């Protein structure tokens, strides 16, 4: 298995709602058009640039930046739903203990991935350019990342949902034409298919990838 860049979920505020794979695919290919949604666009703009401000805050130590970014992720992303979604059909077959073990490994791997990249920010900003309302409270927001090390604007699409409490949540993000939540699920389910559903194989893979992330570059050669 080649693990996809989970860091993109967190830096892009992606949190996966408990949707079926079919409904996610349908939502991303539907050609529904409607007026723009100012509230959804404001959510994407504010939270994305909030993340970038944390990354670019030179007054913070590395440890403080890690702590702030973890709090940010917990506030904006629904990590439990992400965790359940990426397991796909295998979520239903796991015991509580197996799921808990996977959840810890998955979150620690994700933390390690984005924490190893906290120092790569170089002044990028995000601007919202459009949005499409699929139905009330379900919006695709189109944005561009510009500046910093970005030579050409990077197009990023967000699917955001508004919950019963009125809060918006990002449920998937498309970067360079790839919907990341769907791709992660495909990778994880493929790994579990090959392992005959053995969650310990996926957990071991996550732990191994995590160790590779924190290993000094010289040790990887």
Image: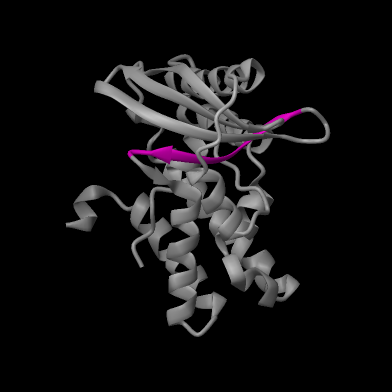
Q: Nearer the viewer, residue 23 or 192?
A: 23
Residue 199 vertical position relative to residue 168 in the rendered view, above or below? below
Q: Nearer the viewer, residue 213 or 162?
A: 162
The quarter of the rendered structure image containing the N terminus is bottom left
Residue 78 vertical position relative to residue 157 in the rendered view, above or below? below
Give x and y (percent) for residue 156: 41, 31
Residue 168 in view: yes
Residue 207 in view: no
- Residue 67, image quadrant: top right
- The colouring scheme, among rainbow, by chain, secondary structure or one colour, is one colour
Q: Residue at x 33, y 18 (%)?
A: 146
Q: Residue at x 42, y 81 (%)?
A: 194
The residue sitting at the bottom extreme is 196
Residue 46 vertical position relative to residue 172 in the rendered view, above or below? above
How many discs mark residues in the rendered view?
A: 0
What is the magenta segment's predominant secondary structure?
strand
The residue sitting at the left extreme is 221
Give x and y (percent) for residue 96: 74, 71
Give x and y (percent) for residue 201: 48, 76
The residue sitting at the right extreme is 165
- Residue 155, image quadrant: top left
Question: Is 144 displayed left or right of 74 in the figure?
Answer: left
Q: Nearer the viewer, residue 54 or 48?
A: 48
Q: Residue at x 60, y 47 (%)?
A: 16
User: What span is in magenta?
Assistant: 167-176
Give x and y (percent) for residue 147: 31, 15
Residue 174 part of the magenta segment = yes
The quarter of the rendered structure image containing the C terminus is bottom left
Question: Is 34 displayed left or right of 183 in the figure?
Answer: right
Residue 208 vertical position relative to residue 124 in the rendered view, above or below? below
Q: Residue at x 63, y 23 (%)?
A: 40
């Amino acid at each position: 298995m080649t693990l996809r860049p989970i860091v993109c979920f967190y830096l892009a505020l992606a949190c996966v709602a408990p949707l079926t794979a079919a409904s996610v695919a349908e939502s991303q290919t539907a050609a529904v058009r409607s007026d723009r949604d100012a509230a959804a666009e404001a959510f994407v703009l504010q939270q994305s640039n909030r993340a970038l401000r944390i990354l670019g805050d030179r007054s913070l130590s590395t440890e403080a930046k890690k702590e702030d970014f973890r709090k940010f992720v917990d506030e904006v992303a629904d990590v439990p739903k992400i965790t359940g979604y990426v397991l796909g059909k295998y979520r239903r077959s796991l015991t509580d203990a197996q799921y808990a073990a996977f959840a810890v490994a998955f979150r620690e791997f994700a933390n390690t991935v984005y924490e190893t990249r906290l120092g790569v920010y170089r002044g990028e900003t995000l601007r919202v350019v459009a949005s499409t309302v699929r139905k009330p409270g379900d919006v695709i927001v189109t944005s561009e990342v510009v500046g910093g090390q970005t030579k050409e604007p990077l197009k990023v699409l967000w699917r955001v949902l508004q919950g019963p409490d009125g809060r918006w949540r990002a449920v998937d993000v498309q970067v360079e034409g790839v919907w990341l939540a769907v791709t992660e699920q495909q990778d994880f389910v493929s790994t579990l298919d090959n392992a005959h559903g053995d969650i310990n194989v996926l957990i071991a893979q996550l732990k191994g990838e995590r160790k590779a992330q924190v290993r000094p570059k010289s040790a990887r050669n």
